[in-house]
Structures are given as C-alpha cells and as structure tokens.
Amino acid sequence: DAGVIQSPRHEVTEMGQEVTLRCKPISGHNSLFWYRQTMMRGLELLIYFNNNVPIDDSGMPEDRFSAKMPNASFSTLKIQPSEPRDSAVYFCASSGTGRRNYGYTFGSGTRLTVV
Amino acid sequence: DAKTTQPTSMDCAEGRAANLPCNHSTISGNEYVYWYRQIHSQGPQYIIHGLKNNETNEMASLIITEDRKSSTLILPHATLRDTAVYYCIVRAATVSSASKIIFGSGTRLSIRP
C-alpha cells in the first residue's frame, strides 16, 4: 500500500500562473478530501468528494480554486490565477467507509509558493 | 460536529506517559472521538478513535469519561519521535459515507530528553 500520493511535493510559481495539484487516493477508498494549511489559519478543509461526487465545497476560498475527481483513483486541485496569499501546504486525504474505515489517511502534501 | 477544547501546549519527559486531555462537552450520541497527530512537515496521522468504551492500539490508549464530555489520549512511553501537534476531533461516523473532519488548533506536545 503506497498510501495517498500527492504531486508535486514542492511547487514555486509566479503570481498569475495556473497551478495544478494532484492526488491519488488509496485504492478502495471512496472519499477524498483537500485541505490547506498555513501558520495563520491552521488546517482548513477546502472540499471533499464521496464516490467521485463533490459533497461540500464551502471551504473553497473563491472562484480561482476548482477541484475535480474524474475517477476513483485521481483528483486535481487547480488554482487559476494564483496569488501570493495562496502559498501554503496543500494536503489530500482519503478514507474508506464501513465500520473498519473511519480514519483518514493523508498524503505528504504539496508545498506551494507563489511569488 | 461538536467543538473540542485542548491545551495549547504540553511537555513530557522521554519514557514517561504523556496524557493529553480534551473536552467535548457538547458531543452528541452518534459522535465519535478521534485523535490525530501531525509531526512537523508531515501530513496528519490517524492515531485512535472511540465512541464510549476505552480503546487501545499499538500507538496509544483512549480513555473516554462515562458522560463522554471529555477524553484523554495516553502515549504510554513517550519518545522524542512523539513530539507533534495532537488534534482531538469529534465527528459523526456513518457506514454509508465519510463525513468531514474539522481540525482545531490542537495541543503541541514536546518530549524532553
């Protein structure tokens, strides 16, 4: 089990550029979550999917952010255009359902720096 | 989901038991208590969860009071690698679909040599 895989690990981009973060959940998990972490605001839930369907995107900061999950093994979080205040560590997590699968498994995160 | 209250920081001597408290006085009957930790620069890691009975696994023990309004995470023999931020979360768990986890500020645990 390779765990939740995120790419890239680090991303440095210029303001105004499009940024795409990628996540591969654990096989068999049917829920996927995107979080953002900064020193000021801690861990914030941006959006989550159940069975590839977005359930709650109330944490998405604004229209510049979008997330997709085209299939059970892949999700993207896109920022267009990026701004310096988007600099943060972005985590993806997945979870199964059923009585044995209540915990989330997090990826190693993508550290985004927008200059 | 019910809110939780944790101390901002704690420290513990290496080799001793670390006891991390959490208050969740507004917890509902169908809400579980979860603990996660985040070691610097890593993603949060699931530790343990419970409903009303005490739970133990290879990482820790979870003690939940009878009225379920508070709980304690116990790391029986703390090591330097247990230095992390520990999050106590209350969350409804359903069989059919996962529900979201909202992280608070957590407790920053420092293990001293």
Image (tube, rainbow, N blue to C red):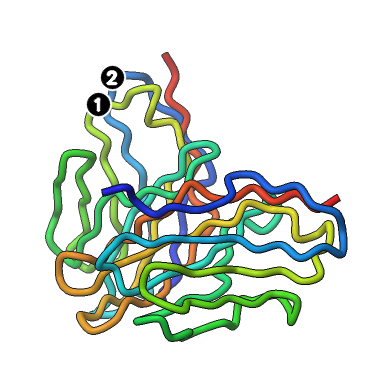
Q: Position of residue A92 (x, y in %)?
A: 48, 60
Is the Cβ of the residue at disc 1 closer than 8 Å to that at disc 2? yes
The location of residue A7, given as percent across then percent down, is 54, 52
Residue B12 sits above or below residue B54 on the image = above
Q: Residue at x 22, y 41 (%)?
A: B60
Q: Amino acid at mark 2?
A: Gly
Q: Quadrant of the N terminus of chain B?
A: bottom left
Q: Are marks 1 and 2 on the same chain?
A: yes
Q: Position of residue A78 (x, y in %)?
A: 66, 69
Instruction: Give the residue at mark 1.
Output: B77
In-front residue for pair A67/B51 = A67
Q: Quadrant of residue A73?
A: bottom left
Q: Which is nearer the N-term, disc 1 or disc 2?
A: 2
Which quarter of the picture shows residue A80?
Answer: bottom right
Q: Residue at x 75, y 60 (%)?
A: A86
Q: Is disc 2 placed on a helix, strand or loop?
A: loop
Element marked by disc 1: loop
Residue that carries the numbered disc 2 in the rendered image = B15
Image height of A49 relative to B25, above or below? below
User: Dot 1: few (<14), some (14–19), or many (≥20) neighbours within 10 Å?
Assistant: some
Q: Position of residue B29 (x, y in %)?
A: 24, 80
Depicted A56 relative to depicted B102: above or below: below
Relative horizontal placement of residue B62, taking residue B10 as reference (left or right): left
Residue B74 versus residue A18 in the image, above or below: above
Mark 1–mark 2 Cα distance, whole angstroms, equals 5 Å
Image position of A33 (left or right of B13): right
Chain of residue at mark 2? B
| Subunit under mark 1 | B
